[in-house]
Amino acid sequence: MSSCRVKSAQATAVCATAENSQANPRLVMLMLGVLAMLAAVVTISSVSAGDVAVKGAWIREAPPVARVHAAYFEISNASGTPVQVTGVSSPAYRRAELHHSKEIDGVATMEKLAQIEVAPGKAVAFVPGGLHVMLFDPVTAKTLGDEVPLVLEMGDGGRLEVMAQVRKDASGHAGGHGAMHHGH
Ligand SMILES: [Cu+2]
């Protein structure tokens, strides 16, 4: 049994204590337990999963030949510190990216973003014509009403999985607005 695997100032202290006291295993276990509790407290004081919420996730229905889809949602941050979305993926697509649509000289274009940040107490909306998740190469055909998992990679190393529903528009209505919703 090794009590010296954890490389930190506290762990070094534990090792020294253990050697001085003939490596009393119970004392070592107790101190390692205290260290684990301290580590847990540190984790909780940053952003916990419950602070970040995603709602209304949907993917715009596209013709079967489309190799690129767009996903939208709203992400909110109830914590006291900024949170970042640093990446996105989906088991239902071969590749996914964070995108932002904008107009340059009257021409609609879009750029790939390395990350987006949600300020404390704020929400960021991914909407047609603005921020969106670009989904490339669907693994299977998607039809209206399908539930598709999206995985958001967070700046703190966490992952947030949400289900996005395939719809014609954000409201979930079957009708949509035709030409108004072209492009992304
Ligand atoms: Cu895009």
Image: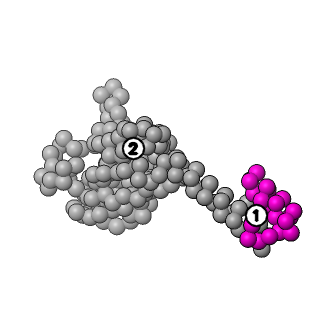
Write down the residue under mark 2.
78
Image position, residue 171 (x, y; %): 18, 50
Disc nearer the start of the sequence (2/1): 1
Label 2: how many residues lie within 10 Å, few (<14), some (14-19) or many (20+)?
some
**Residue 145 shown in magenta:** no
Query: Vertical placement of 56 versus 20: above or below?
Result: above
Alpha-carbon span between mark 2 and mark 1: 36 Å
Say which amino acid is labelled 1.
Arg
Image position, residue 122 (x, y; %): 37, 38
In this view, which residue lies farthest toward the top? 105
Bounds of the magenta span? 9-27
Question: For this rendering, which residue is in front, 109 or 99?
Answer: 99
**Residue at image coords 73%, 71%:** 26
For the question of whether residue 112 can be seen, the reply is no
In this view, which residue lies farthest toward the left? 175
Image position, residue 108 (x, y; %): 32, 35
